[in-house]
Every structure is written in structure tokens, then in C-alpha cells.
Image (cartoon, grey):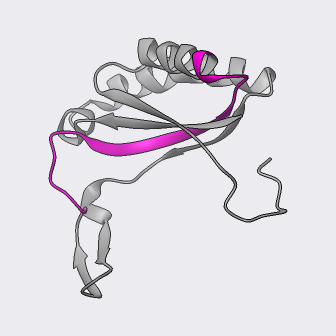
Amino acid sequence: MHYAILCYNSEAVVTSWTKEEDDAVMAKLHVVHERLEKAGKLGPSIRLLPTTTATTLFKQKDLVIDGPYAETKEQLLGFYVIDCADLDEAVAIARELGVANPGGAYEIRPMALFLPGVPLS
């Protein structure tokens, strides 16, 4: 089963890291990424640009505004697509990523294919 691991953290905290601090976190995550890739578990992993680059469409009003949909303490900063046997394995992977990346939270959601007949992988 494919799962999405959604990465939430305070954008203010993450963007305040020095280049060295960011590089250190990315190096720790790279170790996890390599292991997952070699195991055939890692799909796309995305680091989103800051919410200041976001544009939101309010569907009912057909209104487009600059910025994120909601102002919250933590923002969606990126996500992973992983292939796991079950939720327990997905949680274990999220824990492993959490050791490498301080703060925030991971939301784990099973994925369903939206386009019938098109393989996810």
C-alpha cells in the first residue's frame, strides 16, 4: 500500500535555520532516504517552497488570493510517497524521519489511485 507522509513544522523555525543547520538536517534525512530507496520503498519526496509563494483558490467564490489557505502555527512543508506493507511500517518510517528532522509532526495517510487503470509506481 502507498502512504503519503505529510511533513508539518513551523515555517518560521525552519526558515530561520542557518545554511549549516539546514544542510545538517538534510544530510541526516539523506541517510534515511538512501535506505528507503535501496529497499524500493521511497517514491517522490517533495520540499515545498515557503507559504509566501503560495496562491489559494477559494472554489465556491472563484476567488484567488496570495498566500496559504490557513494561517496556522505549523505549515505543510513537504511530503513523501512511500510503499509499505501496512500502517505500522509507515509509522516506523515516519519515526525514523522524525529522528533526522527535529520538531513538527508527520501526518500519515493511505493513498488511493485517482486515475483508474494508471499504476501509481
Q: Which residue occupies 42% across, 17% down?
A: 98
- Left/right placement of residue 59 relative to residue 94 reads left
Q: Which residue occupies 60% across, 18% down?
A: 32
Q: Is residue 64 magenta?
A: no
Residue 84 percent location from the top left of the image: 70, 26
Q: Nearer the viewer, residue 38 or 92?
A: 92
Q: Pick out the residue farthest to the bottom.
A: 62
In what quadrant of the picture does the N terminus appear? Answer: top right
Which range is magenta? 69-88
Q: Which residue occupies 28% across, 83% down?
A: 60
- Left/right placement of residue 62 relative to residue 115 reads left
Image quarter for residue 118?
bottom right
Residue 109 percent location from the top left of the image: 51, 37
Q: Is residue 74 magenta?
A: yes
- Left/right placement of residue 112 relative to residue 72 reads right
Image quarter for residue 43?
top right
Image quarter for residue 54?
bottom left
Please determine whether, in this image, residue 78 is positioned above or below residue 29: below
- Left/right placement of residue 97 relative to residue 84 reads left
Number of numbered discs on residues: 0
Residue 117 percent location from the top left of the image: 84, 62
Q: Which residue occupies 23% across, 66% down?
A: 67
Residue 104 percent location from the top left of the image: 29, 27
